[in-house]
Image (cartoon, helix red, strand yellow):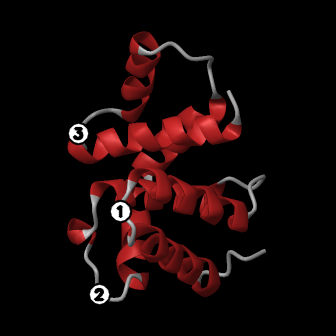
Amino acid sequence: MTRREARELAFSLLYELTFFPEKDPEELYRSEREVRPFEEDDYVKTVVVGAAKSKEQIDALVERYSNGWKVKRISRISLAILRLCIYEMLYVEDIPFSVSINEAVELCKKYNDDKAPAFVNGILNTIADKEGLKG
């Protein structure tokens, strides 16, 4: 599985967690492997579990840097993409922030409406600037 495919799978699992936040992310990962077999991928498991466990911290960053938007008002698709990318920027050292942001924008283009890529890009770049994540 390519990194892009792994990221897309991680996004789909994080999106599912927006509907079922009480689900255990590790159990969700395991059950997804049973339903839709894919090769074991440490990246997917790490990002899904990590983003789910860091949700409060990540959501606080989103609210702080989204110009008055509350997490509850952000589409579930955008929110799952933001959680994925922000987790990568904060905790996955081998992925440059610019790659994370670009991949988030590409996911938005594929799964979200026309305005979402600019919205997500703006939040992510602001977080990268203000939180000193640009390397």
Q: Earlier in the sequence, mark 1 or mark 2?
A: 2
Picture quarter containing residue 124? bottom right
What amino acid type should be assigned to the residue bearing mark 3?
Glu
First along the sequence among labels 3 and 2: 3
Which residue is identified by label 3? 22
Residue 64 image offset from top left, x and y in percent: 39, 83
Q: Where's residue 132, x and y in %?
A: 67, 81
Q: Quadrant of residue 75?
A: bottom left
Which residue is pictured at 25% across the width and 44% down the height? 21
Given contact means CB atoms under 8 Å apart, are the residues at marks 1 and 3 in contact? no
Q: Is residue 101 left or right of residue 24?
A: right
User: What residue did someone put label 1 on?
Assistant: 113
Which SS class for mark 3?
loop
Cα separation, mark 1 vs mark 2, equals 20 Å
Q: Place residue 102 in its image quadrant.
A: bottom right
**Relative vertical location of residue 52 with respect to residue 117 in this rendering, above or below:** above
- Provide the residue designation for mark 2: 68
Observer-side mark, 3 or 2, equals: 2
- Left or right of 93: which side holds 59? left
**Residue 23: image location, x then y, percent:** 27, 34
